[in-house]
């Protein structure tokens, strides 16, 4: 990790989990949460860098990662609530815009709070079989073959020279 990333990691550590997670819930996204968090030497705010430092901070401990997953689930629950409010405010004039907003927030809720708002896991069952009629025909054929008596006979080998040609 470079000098700048270490400085940014220190900023995250000084801010603390609680304040950082609260900031996330207010902003609604990690990118918006990190905007303006870093400052250059002149004191002017810089846009957030890649998410590398933030996720490295989260993965520094299993406990912190577990808390982050709980915060994300809370964000998903909030998105589901926002879907209901947006749906209540739909008019003929804003229906298209509200539809996009609702679908986006529904997607967020389904991804961040899968246990509460996600649909069942997509499973595909493929069964290949033969129809019942085909199996019945095979069983009948097998039964008929068992019913045919086998004749006992002597096997005779005829040398090729003795076989008459027509």
Image: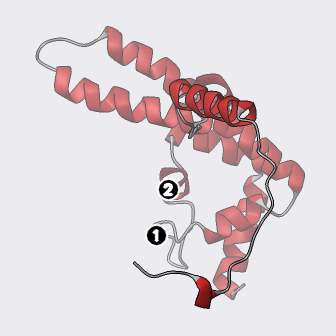
> Where is residue 85 drawn, in percent x and y?
40, 14
Find numbered disc 1 in the image and state the secondary structure of the residue it sits on.
loop
What residue appears at the point 51 percent right and 42 percent down from the top-left corner?
Answer: 27
Residue 111 occupies quadrant: top right
Determine crowd level at label 1: few under 14, some 14-19, many 20+ residues with C-alpha closer than 10 A. few
Find numbered disc 2 in the image and state the secondary structure of the residue it sits on.
helix
Determine crowd level at label 2: few under 14, some 14-19, many 20+ residues with C-alpha closer than 10 A. some
Residue 166 occupies quadrant: bottom left
Q: Which mark is residue 54?
A: none
Left or right of 56 on screen, residue 163: left
Q: Nearer the viewer, mark 2 or mark 1?
A: 2
Quarter of the image where the N terminus is located: bottom right
What residue appears at the point 73 percent right and 45 percent down from the top-left corner?
Answer: 68
| Residue under numbered circle 1 | 44
Q: What distance separates the C-alpha of mark 2 from that of mark 1?
A: 18 Å
Total marks placed? 2
Q: Which residue occupies the extreme top position in the image? A: 88
Q: Which mark is residue 31?
A: 2
Q: Is residue 115 above or below residue 61?
A: above
Return the residue nearer the eye: 68 or 27. Answer: 68
């Amino acid at each position: 990790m470079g000098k700048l990333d270490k400085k940014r990691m220190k900023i995250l550590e000084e801010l603390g989990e609680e304040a950082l997670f609260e900031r996330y819930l207010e902003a609604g996204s990690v990118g918006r949460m990190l905007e303006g968090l870093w400052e250059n030497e002149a004191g002017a705010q810089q846009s957030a860098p890649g998410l590398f430092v933030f996720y490295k901070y989260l993965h520094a401990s299993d406990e912190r990662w577990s808390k982050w997953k709980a915060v994300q689930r809370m964000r998903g629950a909030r998105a589901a609530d926002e879907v209901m409010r947006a749906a209540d405010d739909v008019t003929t004039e804003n229906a298209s815009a509200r539809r996009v907003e609702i679908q986006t927030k529904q997607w967020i809720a389904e991804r961040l709070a899968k246990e509460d708002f996600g649909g069942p896991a997509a499973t595909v069952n493929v069964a290949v079989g033969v129809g019942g009629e085909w199996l019945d025909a095979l069983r009948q054929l097998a039964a008929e073959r068992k019913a045919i008596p086998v004749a006992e006979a002597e096997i005779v080998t005829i040398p090729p020279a003795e076989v008459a040609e027509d």
